[in-house]
Amino acid sequence: MLRMVKTGLHTLRVALVVLLAVALTGVAPLRAAQAQPIVNAAEARADLQATLARADVQAELVTLGVSADEASARVASMSDAEVLALHGKVADLPAGQGFAEAVAGILLVTLLVFVITDLLGYTDVLPFINPLPRPAN
C-alpha cells in the first residue's frame, strides 16, 4: 500500500514538473516592441494611394463593389487625422507576419517536452540525454 502511494506521488510530481515546464516556456508568443517611423499626413496619404494602386488591392476593391478611382478619391478627400488613423491601421495589419516565430516556438516547445520526457525516462527520443535515476521504492 505504501509503495502504491509513493508511486502515485512520484507520478503526480512528474506531471506537475512537466506542466510547469510547459507553462514557463511561454507558450503564448511574446511580441517584441517594434519601432515604426513617424510619418506625416502627406507621406501617409501617398502611401495609402500607392497601396490602392496595387493590383491585388484593386481586385479586392472590385469584389467589394468599389472602383479603384472611387477609393482613391475617398482617400484624397479625407482629413489629415483620418489619413493618419487609416495609415496606422493598414500598417498594423498582419500579412503573414509571425509565421516563422510561431513555427520556432512550436519546435522549441516540442524539443523541451522531449527533453523532459527523456530525462524522466518515459521516452528515448534524444539519444544524447540519459534518464535521471529513479528513486528507490
Image: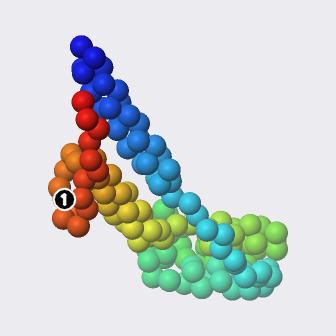
Q: Amino acid at mark 1?
A: Val
Residue 97 at x, y = what percent? Answer: 48, 71
Q: Residues within 10 Å of mark 1 (few under 14, many from 20)?
A: few
Q: Is residue 136 above or below residue 1?
A: below
Please tell me in which quadrant of the rendered image residue 101 appears: bottom left
In the image, what residue occupies the spot 82% across and 74% down? Answer: 80
Residue 91 at x, y = what percent? Answer: 62, 72
**Residue 60 seen anywhere in this rendered image of the structure:** no
| Closest to the observer, 65 or 106 | 106
| Closest to the observer, 88 or 5 | 5
Report the number of discs.
1
> Would you name the residue on which mark 1 appears?
125
Q: Is residue 5 left or right of residue 42?
A: left
In the image, what residue occupies the spot 64% across and 79% down? Answer: 48
The quadrant the N terminus occupies is top left
In the image, what residue occupies the spot 46% across and 43% down? Answer: 20
In the image, what residue occupies the spot 77% across and 81% down? Answer: 38
Residue 127 at x, y = what percent? Answer: 18, 64
